[in-house]
Amino acid sequence: MTLNWIAPAERIQKLPPYVFARLDELKAKAREQGLDLIDLGMGNPDGATPQPVVEAAIKALQNPANHGYPPFEGTASFRRAITNWYRRRYEVDLDPDSEALPLLGSKEGLTHLALAYINPGDLVLVPSPAYPAHFRGPVIAGGKVHSLILTPENDWLIDLAAIPDAVAEQAKMLYFNYPSNPTAATAPREFFTEIVAFARKYEILLVHDLCYAELAFDGYQPTSLLEIKGAKDIGVEFHTMSKTYNMAGWRVGFVVGNRHVIQGLRTLKTNLDYGIFAALQTAAETALQLPDVYLKEVQERYRNRRDFLIQGLGKLGWNVDKTKATMYLWVKCPVGRGSTDFALDVLQKTGVVVTPGNAFGVAGEGYVRISLIAECDRLGEALHRFEQAGIHYC
Ligand SMILES: *Cc1c(COP(=O)(O)O)cnc(C)c1O
């Protein structure tokens, strides 16, 4: 007997279609045929976790005290490492007991925060394009998503002045993310000041995703929401160990900021999970304490790849501005080509995987995202195949 006549809940049915499905199918087929795929589609860092972090994990694994259920709210020492890191990096003081909460990766927290705060029908402001969890979380919670359309003319920044008063008054929550996945845009400090004033005025819970806090280049230092005066009254900020520290598989992130919001999320999570394996929290602590020379190395690696790929794409007719942060290039499809159509064409002709921009919302249409997750020799191979297949900007 099959149960396919029992329909899944509306919250699942309402999710926008999964754009990656057709791409995954073609990827699987290409692999079966033994094609040498160059996968620049995911935001999955290709490097190894730093050796001191791996060693800290091995040592912590040997300690039976770490083998039981971890504390719901995360270990005290990881929370302290988080607030110490904040003080060192941003000169912001936070209380490790009430203003910091470890997460099973930031995606988990970003999504669950919507469940903790959004009632069916509540309005949530989310940029388009955006990281999918920023709109999928609110949809799962039954909220109504109002898209804030981003454009290249406005440097992919949210145009706060364009949000109608009636919408702002109704909105309960706003997600945003600079440096941005997928556009790689960064926001000047004044923008943060403006968005904090906006959220305070309309009493909106401000959710900033700073997962590229340290993947920045040429001396640029991304702004933390909590550096802005008054931000902690209305906001929280999410961080991840996945990107900077090559720990995507470990599933460790954290949220900091307003204590009431953090308490709300903690209450939901005590009903859903038991937190992060304590041994991994010890390792994550080590990562946050790594000397800056490690960061410099990571930043150099991505900066080299960025320069290499921008130059190569330039020879194929693409004029891509130098990015100041993230591990992505946000690249225009040739004129008149749709994102999905172009990404599938590139995959079929070259075996190079790029992500269609519409996976990040309607306003991502007309673009593809290329991740800098391969060494320059592989990126060079990808460019060579583009040239051979006649793929260029026109
Ligand atoms: C990669 C990424 C995350 C990280 O998610 P984890 O669950 O912590 O691995 C969160 N937000 C954005 C915008 C990302 O690009």
Image (tube, helix red, strand yellow):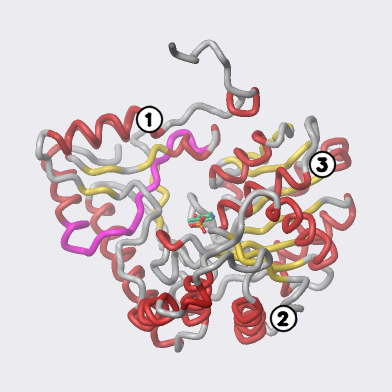
Mark 2 or mark 3: name the one nearer the start of the chain: 2
Q: Position of residue 194 (x, y in %)?
A: 77, 60
Q: Residue at x 48, y 56 (%)?
A: 184
Is residue 366 highlighted in magenta?
Answer: yes
Mark 3 or mark 1: name the one nearer the start of the chain: 1
Q: Which residue bears the numbered disc 3?
A: 171
Give the extent of the magenta segment: 364-380
Q: Look at label 2 and name its amino acid.
A: Val
Report the disc number at residue 21. Answer: 1
Report the disc number at residue 40. Answer: none
Which quadrant holds the N terminus?
A: top left
Q: Residue at x 40, y 87 (%)?
A: 293
Q: Which residue bears the numbered disc 2?
A: 92
Q: Position of residue 122 (x, y in %)?
A: 80, 35
218 shown above or below 183: below
Please indicate, yes or no, whether residue 267 appears anywhere in the rendered image: yes
Q: Residue at x 41, y 66 (%)?
A: 247
Q: Look at label 1 and name its amino acid.
A: Ala
Q: Position of residue 362 (x, y in %)?
A: 54, 32
Q: Look at label 3 and name its amino acid.
A: Ala
